[in-house]
Image (cartoon, helix red, strand yellow):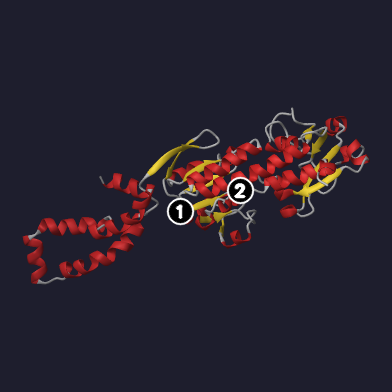
Amino acid sequence: MYFQFHKSLSGEGISLRLLWVLCVSAVNPLLRKLTAETLRTRRFRREKPGLWLLLIAMFAIGLTPSCSNRLNHPSAPTAETREVTDEAGRRVRLPLKIERIVSLAPNLTEIVYAVGAGDRLVGRTRYCDYPLEVKNVAEIGDTMTPSIERIIALKPQVVLVSTASQLEAFTKQLEQQKIAVYVTNPRSLDEVFRSITTFGDLFGTQDRAARLVTELRRRADAVAAAVGTTKPITVFYQVSDEPLYTIGRESYLTDLVRRAGGVSVTADVANAFPRFSDEAALAARPEAIILPTGGSMGSANSDVAKALKNSPAALNNRVYKINEDHLQRPGPRLVDGLEEMARALHPEVFK
């Protein structure tokens, strides 16, 4: 029984040392009376040995009935749970009411605030810098190597990650602490909208999420109507220049380029963000090049890769720099990036 009890406490993140500290104040007055070498003490031990042994046993494991009730009370609101399926196809059990959230990606942080749950965010990465009030939230490291100790100390009910690739290093540790991990992995603008809707459902802010998605869809539809009669422009999306990375068929950005009135020259390349050879880039001959730069990246990725210097896009001065935060964070501001890209590719229809 003791080991089962210890295991259950460990699962709740409560150590026996902590229980001992909390309970000693409740037991100590009794022990002072019962351990004093007086006739009264000896009489108590002789007349009520069962009660005496029970008190000692409870002290040894750091538990009294009053302390147990006090410790169990905070967990009562989270007793009710539900099982959901995340975007990686994993079945995740979450509390019906989520009050403590950790986000491990800037786009997820933005969605949490956008659906009205920002006040429940207790941890974020150093790259989570929007909206401005997120700077007041505890930092737990970077996106790929967060501090597990800091996350556990924050006692979140769910940790949000942006792709399954973030899971391998720390999922088991978090699950041992009974901390749920929820994965998002959108591959199109519609799937980004789905993520926003899902967050509204998870956090009980369905109405606000629905209004947001309705407005974002309205803006996306306006872009589609504007570029619908234009000739698609071949586009090379440069994720980085040295080494050269681009977008592939599994990236939501390939869908965004299409919606903006373009067609990615790497749309059929495997993976979401493949490395691209100089020879392949030279052969692609794009009519336009998109450089996600500025924003939180500063001046990084602001120059066209050497392999593309003689492309039709570069020679015709059709190289467009767009705020990286509006493109590479699949959240509400992705529609800003869509509008900016469409205006760059087809300025004639936005005059």
Give 54 or 318, whichever is nearer the viewer: 318
Check whether the beta carbons of the residues at disc 1 and disc 2 lie within 8 A of each other: no
Residue 330 location, x and y as percent?
65, 44
Res 186 seen here: no
The answer to whether residue 41 is left or right of residue 15 is left
Residue nearest the viewer, comparing 145 with 279: 279
329 horizontally vs 348: left or right = left
Q: Is residue 117 left or right of residue 334?
A: left
Q: Residues within 10 Å of mark 1 (few under 14, many from 20)?
A: some
Give the labeled residue for mark 1.
99
Quadrant in which the N terminus appears: top left
Distance of label 1 from label 2 (alpha carbons): 19 Å
Q: Quadrant of residue 166?
A: top right
Q: Nearer the viewer, residue 165 or 227?
A: 227
In the rendered image, residue 181, in percent from the top left (x then y), is placed at 50, 43
Quick check: can you spot residue 199?
yes
Residue shown at 14% from the left, 71% from the top = 37
The residue that disc 2 covers is 105
Q: Residues within 10 Å of mark 2 (few under 14, many from 20)?
A: many
In the rendered picture of this protein, how many numbered marks are placed on residues? 2
What residue lies at 74% left-to-right and 38% top-to-bottom? 225
Residue 125: image tag? none
In this rendering, the answer to whether 50 lies above or below 258 is below
Which three-letter amino acid code belongs to the residue tagged 1? Glu
Q: Mark 2 is on which residue type?
A: Ala
Q: Secondary structure at mark 1?
A: loop
- Tell me where residue 78 appears, x and y as whole percent: 38, 49
Instruction: Judge depth for marks 1 and 2 and give the one in front.
Output: 1
Q: Which residue is pictured at 45% across the width and 43% down the height?
A: 175
Give x and y (percent) for residue 219: 68, 44
